[in-house]
Amino acid sequence: MEKAILLVDDDADDRMLFEEIYAELGYNKEQLMQLENGQEVVDFIAEKNAETLPALIILDHNMPKMTGEQTLRYLKSNPEYSNIPVVIYSTSIFGQFAEDCKELGAVLVLEKPGLYRDYNEMIAKVMSLVQ
């Protein structure tokens, strides 16, 4: 069985668009799990074992309860989860923020695309991390 991908974004429209393009690119929608904030990630992964942890976590930065950066800090500070690749994406990425996230362990820091075709490229780039 393929390992799951975890998408965490408080914007339902962004999650729906990601899921739609993910499926169009030929990925199994059943493997795409979705949560709305970082606190849900903490609760979710606490119930998993090494075999059922996601292969990749994609975090929106601007979320309630725990931001993407706070969630990234949590994941990378915990030895059980620190090896899971984490991508941060947000509507606006500025230089120092991107550098900080990479220093914390994010494998990619991406700006949310404005165009549909750019979403295709972003998802393909993100998925190349787990293939």
Image (spheres, rainbow, N blue to C red):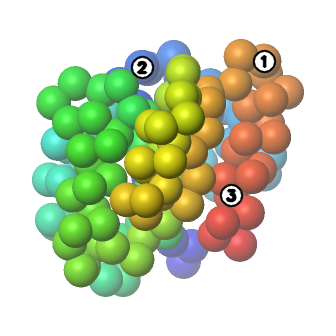
The residue at which mark 1 appears reads as 115
Q: Is 105 displayed left or right of 110 in the figure?
A: left
Q: Nearer the viewer, residue 24 or 42?
A: 42
Residue neighbourhood size for the residue with mark 2, other residues' Cα within 10 Å, grouped as few (<14), some (14–19), many (≥20): few
Q: Residues within 10 Å of mark 3 (few under 14, many from 20)?
A: some
Residue 35 x/y as whole percent: 33, 39
Dots 2, 1 in contact, CB < 8 A: no
Identify the residue position indicated by label 3 in the image.
127
Residue extending farthest right: 117
Earlier along the polypeptide chain: callout 2 or callout 1? 2
| Badge 3 or badge 2: first in the primary sequence | 2
Residue ID at (27%, 48%): 71
Q: Is residue 81 left or right of residue 43?
A: right
Dot 2: what SS? Answer: loop
Quarter of the image where the N terminus is located: bottom right
- Residue neighbourhood size for the residue with mark 1, other residues' Cα within 10 Å, grouped as few (<14), some (14–19), many (≥20): few
List the residue tagged with mark 2: 11
How many callouts does the rendering have?
3
As displayed, is residue 65 above or below residue 106? above
Which amino acid is tagged 1? Answer: Leu
Left or right placement of residue 38 versus residue 62 in this view:
left
In space, the residues marked 3 and 1 are separated at their CA atoms by: 18 Å
Picture residue at 20% right of the left edge, 72% below the top: 78
Does residue 91 appear left or right of residue 41 in this picture?
A: right
